[in-house]
Image (cartoon, grey):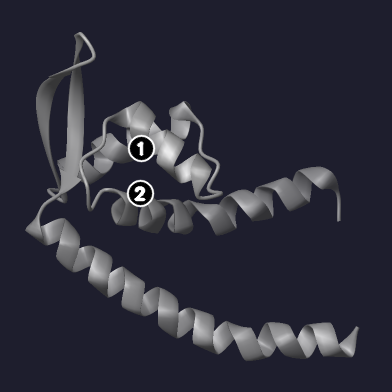
């Protein structure tokens, strides 16, 4: 497999995970940069060109509330999960746990066969 093919597969794998990571991080209010920093600190790399459109899409879907706040001498738009977003996060969390439970034995079997 070429590096390009592997990169495409990694990107595909990460797409859904990023939605879950952003939703989980927005249990507390964040503006774009603080959200990106929290994700990076947790080991989830995401560039601004991916993060900001994702936040806007989640807000347009009615999953986030946002408000402008004055912070450190400038206006920043803070985002936080609303009730609908919290419900979706719980559903996706449950799905993630189920998938992880199903995949773990499969992946463990692979490492034993190598």
Mark linked to residue 67: none
- Mark 2 closeness class: few <14, some 14–19, many ≥20 residues within 10 Å: many
User: Residue lying farthest top?
Assistant: 73
Disc with the residue nearer the chain's start (2 vs 1): 2
Q: Vertical placement of 15 versus 77: above or below? A: below
Task: Classify the position of the N terminus by image quarter.
Answer: bottom right
- Mark 1 closeness class: few <14, some 14–19, many ≥20 residues within 10 Å: many
At x 51%, y 38%, the residue is 46
Question: In the figure, is residue 62 to the left or right of 102?
Answer: left
| Image spot of residue 76 (x, y percent) | 20, 20
Q: Observer-nearest residue: 89 or 29?
A: 29
Q: Quadrant of residue 98?
A: bottom left
User: Residue lying farthest front?
Assistant: 72
Task: Classify the position of the C terminus by image quarter.
Answer: bottom right
Q: Give the CA distance from mark 2 to mark 1.
A: 8 Å
| Image spot of residue 9 (x, y percent) | 67, 55
At x 34%, y 72%, the residue is 93
Q: Secondary structure at mark 2?
A: helix
| Image spot of residue 91 (x, y percent) | 26, 73
Q: Quadrant of residue 3?
A: top right
Q: Please tell me whether mark 2 or mark 1 is closer to you in this view.
A: 1
Question: In the figure, is residue 53 to the left or right of 72?
Answer: right
Question: In the figure, is residue 94 to the left or right of 39?
Answer: left
Q: Vertical placement of 15 versus 109: above or below? A: above
| Image spot of residue 87 (x, y percent) | 16, 67
User: Residue lying farthest right?
Assistant: 114
Q: Secondary structure at mark 1?
A: helix
Which residue in the structure is indicated by mark 1?
35
Which residue in the structure is indicated by mark 2?
22
């Amino acid at each position: 497999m070429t590096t390009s093919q592997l990169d495409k597969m990694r990107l595909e794998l990460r797409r859904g995970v990023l939605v879950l990571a952003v939703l989980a991080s927005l249990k507390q209010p964040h503006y774009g940069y603080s959200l990106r920093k929290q994700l990076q600190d947790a080991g989830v790399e995401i560039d601004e060109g991916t993060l900001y459109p994702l936040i806007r899409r989640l807000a347009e879907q009615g999953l986030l509330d946002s408000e402008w706040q004055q912070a450190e001498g400038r206006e920043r738009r803070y985002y936080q999960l609303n009730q609908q977003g919290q419900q979706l996060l719980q559903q996706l969390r449950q799905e993630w746990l189920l998938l992880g439970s199903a995949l773990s034995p499969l992946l463990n079997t692979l490492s034993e066969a190598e």
